[in-house]
Image (spheres, rainbow, N blue to C red):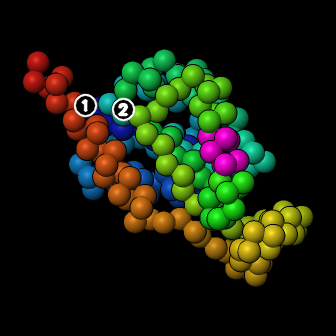
Amino acid sequence: MAGALIVYGTTDGHTANVARRMAQMLTAAGIRPIAVVQPSGILPRPDAFDAVIVAASVHGGRYQKPVARWVQAHAVRLNGKTSAFVSVSLGILQQDPAVQREIHRIVERFLLGSDWRPSTTIDVAGALPYTRYNWLKRWMMRRIAAKAGGDTDTSRDYEYTDWQALNAFCVQFARRVNVAERPAAASA
């Protein structure tokens, strides 16, 4: 088994944490080896892996450009294997139906624009690392959080990821990978 590739884009570091934790969860679920990489420089090709997970965070209504370029370049290969898209954002915490629709539109635009059709997708809540922001970003994010009814104490950081739900997702993904491998193993 060639294992799984996790490609991620991160702006403030939380999606990198999500990617590393998913690697641990997949390893615990029996998927090995796992490569976790950011799309900068030379990346492994998806064909070298049995499965691929792409994780990116929403900022300004878009995902990181290097992730979008990598997915577009490899969409055909990604469509031929078990794959998943993990969308990380704070918007999913809001109960406003308009915000929920917008989050889904962002995911749809990304996938339609890349021609990639992942086997599964999941929305994951992100984080507010106020202490790592410069003063302008801290002020803007505090205003956004206040408007959404979120945490506004900028002297500390907040993490909203539901790690149990993400673990359940990884266990289910590992099952898909293992089922997809069986026919190939039986014909060998």
Secondary structure beneath dot 2 equals strand
Q: Where is residue 72, by image quadrant?
A: top right
Residue 41: x and y in percent read: 61, 31
Position of residue 5 relative to residue 123, above or below, is above
Read off the residue under disc 1. Answer: 180
Amino acid type at image mark 2: Thr
Residue lying furthest front: 97
Read off the residue under disc 2. Answer: 82
Q: Main secondary structure of the magenta part?
A: helix
Question: Horizontally, is 135 left or right of 74 in the view?
Answer: right
Secondary structure beneath dot 1 equals helix
Q: Residue at x 36, y 51 (%)?
A: 170
The number of numbered discs placed on residues in the rendered structure image is 2
Query: Dot 1: few (<14), some (14–19), or many (≥20) neighbours within 10 Å?
Result: some
Q: Which residues are magenta?
A: 101-107
Q: Is residue 106 in the magenta section?
A: yes
Residue 51: x and y in percent read: 36, 34
Q: Is residue 126 visible?
A: no
CB of mark 1 within 8 Å of CB of mark 2?
Answer: yes
**Quarter of the picture holding the N terminus:** top left
Question: Horizontally, is 119 left or right of 12 in the view?
Answer: left
Query: Residue 102 or 68: which is nearer the viewer?
Result: 102
**Quarter of the picture holding the C terminus:** top left
Query: Residue 18 or 113: which is nearer the viewer?
Result: 113
Amino acid type at image mark 1: Ala
Mark-to-mark CA distance, 1 and 2: 7 Å
Question: Horizontally, is 2 left or right of 85 in the view?
Answer: left
Query: Dot 2: few (<14), some (14–19), or many (≥20) neighbours within 10 Å?
Result: many
Q: Disc number at residue 55?
A: none
Residue 104: x and y in percent read: 62, 45
Query: Residue 43 or 99: which is nearer the viewer?
Result: 99
